[in-house]
Amino acid sequence: MPEKSRIASKRMIGKYVARYVRHPAIANTRICGYDGKTVTFWYKDNDGVKHVVTMDVFEFIGTLIQHIPDRQFKMIRYYGAYARKWKASFAFYLQGSITQSKLNDFPRNRSVKCPVCGHVMEFVMYWKNEPPPKNVFGTQILDWNYMCFR
């Protein structure tokens, strides 16, 4: 992140810290190539323009090492409503907000049509299957022994 915008506001600092607490410095999917001497990767700038960069291996490793915290450095794991101290008391509200957002996103006039005739089907009932048996073949060591040496 550029120096000029790093300390613009408390919110910007929070976003910057949160980005590196939960994510690695670079995703493996962004690395395009490696030939033993150079590493090629891509990134998108603030305008959404994709840039491809080729760096020397040692320079690339040096930039990644900058993101490794010092020894005994405590990373922020949970903060606010997700903190362990408050997790139980906020769980009801968090789950409720998630459920409500799902219900709001679900269209009210959704109707399932019959794949054969095309008429709107009417909901009659929901049948929940019984859970699978606890002793499924292949889950115990004896079952693996039977399968391997057969």
Image: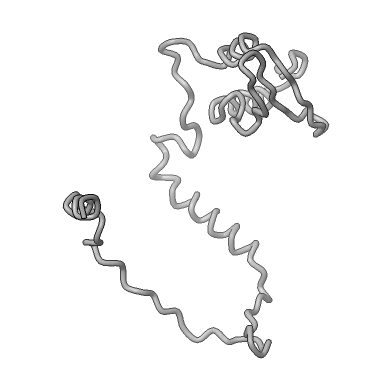
Q: Position of residue 105 (x, y in %)?
A: 65, 62
Q: Position of residue 69 (x, y in %)?
A: 50, 14
Query: For this rendering, which residue is in front, 5 or 30?
Result: 30
Query: For this rendering, which residue is in front, 41 or 48?
Result: 41
Q: Is residue 66 left or right of residue 48?
A: left
Compared to residue 4, the image places residue 30 above or below, namely below
Residue for point 62% across, 13% down: 57
Q: Position of residue 76 (x, y in %)?
A: 48, 25
Residue 2 position by quadrant:
top right
Compared to residue 138, the image places residue 132 above or below, namely below
Quadrant that contains the C terminus: bottom left
Q: Is residue 4 left or right of residue 61?
A: right
Query: For this rendering, which residue is in front, 62 or 105?
Result: 62
Q: Position of residue 136 (x, y in %)?
A: 25, 61
Quadrant that contains the N terminus: top right
Residue for point 65% across, 82% down: 113
Residue for point 48% across, 10% down: 70
Compared to residue 106, the image places residue 28 above or below, namely above
Residue 111 position by quadrant:
bottom right
Residue for point 56% across, 30% down: 23
